[in-house]
Image (tube, rainbow, N blue to C red):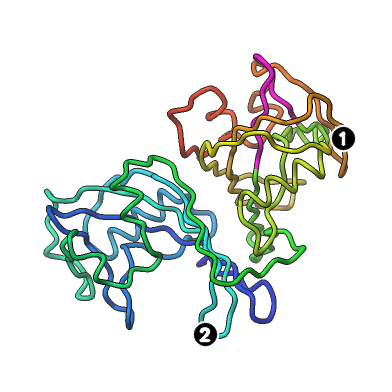
Amino acid sequence: MDMTIKVDQGNIYNIRVAAVCSYNDCYVVDDSNKGYVVHVGGRLKYNETIHEAIKREINEELGIIVEPAFVGVYESFFTYENNNFHEHLFLFAIDISDCDLSNKESYIKLIKKTDIHNYQVFPENCENVIERNEIISINTSVEKQMYQDRDIAFTIGKKDGNDQEYHFRVSALIRNGNKVLIDESASHLQHLIPIGGRLHFGETFNEGLVREIQEELNCTIKNSSFRGIGEDFFIFRNNKQIHFISALFEVELNEEQYTAGDGTVPVWMDISELNPSNTKMLSFLQMLNKKEIKHATSR
């Protein structure tokens, strides 16, 4: 099931993966669209990791099996065919110069890297992220903002009697020595989580992070840096199958004191106390003290 979700009339949330594929002095792109080219990729499927998705897309379009590296996220807001789109594109990169492309689809085209700027590429400037060696980067292209007070949390369907849900979250890694600030409000469900919450439709990562910190701690952010993307898949409350993606930020607060709000129960917890028995966000555990991990999944 492709992850293109109709929020309501005229508003669509879209999740895609793409790979900037280098082939000698060329980029390998999809030329099937009228008026513009796109990097190899497509829509994420429900219950599929972004790494599984990009491997599948590359195999379908280029006829090869490779292991691309995750390099960042491109968040976009645009209008297409009278619909407002909020899109998260998970970006990968790989050099496939040694691969046999004889089985590639007919719409795949090789464009010299020096000529790429002569084409309309959607989304724009993805290749520049790779060229500048920015291992993790968030790019925001805003054509039209569609802010709504609505969480990116959708019921996709049912399977084996379980509701299938997709959630997108912004999470704050707030440290104090060997301790991190954790929300214990769902501890009775063995679901300790970092401070943060669901992103809203039409909201950038930064806007969502600022809002969540204000709502949950009545604080403002002094500094923040993007740490990476976590993916978790779990059953919640016995009847919900959750496909959970979280954008994790290292956050430093302006205020020394905080006041809990919005149902949050914030506590300082030693990192060693967090484990798979008390949280379902296993990807968060993987990234806690390993800055080299930019993409983590519990599967």
Would you say 56 lies left or right of 43 here?
left
Up-down relation of residue 210 to residue 172 (above or below): below
Q: Secondary structure at mark 2?
A: loop
Task: Write the residue at 76% across / 21% down.
Answer: 268
Up-down relation of residue 181 to residue 8 (above or below): above
Q: Main secondary structure of the magenta part?
A: strand
Task: Write the residue at 70% across / 66% down.
Answer: 147
Q: Amino acid at mark 2?
A: Glu
The residue nearer to you, when weighing 181 against 283, is: 181
- Please tell me whether residue 174 belongs to the stretch shown in magenta: yes
Would you say 93 lies left or right of 160 here?
left
x, y percent for residue 186 = 81, 37
Residue beneath label 2, please?
81
In which quadrant of the rendered view does residue 260 lie?
top right
The residue nearer to you, when weighing 129 against 29, is: 129
x, y percent for residue 242 = 65, 51
Q: Which residues are magenta?
A: 171-182
* Label 2 CA crowd tier, 10 Å (few <14, some 14–19, many 20+): few
Q: Secondary structure at mark 1?
A: loop
- State which tag comes first along the sequence, 2 or 1: 2
x, y percent for residue 97 = 13, 50
> How far separated are the C-alphas under marks 2 and 1?
43 Å
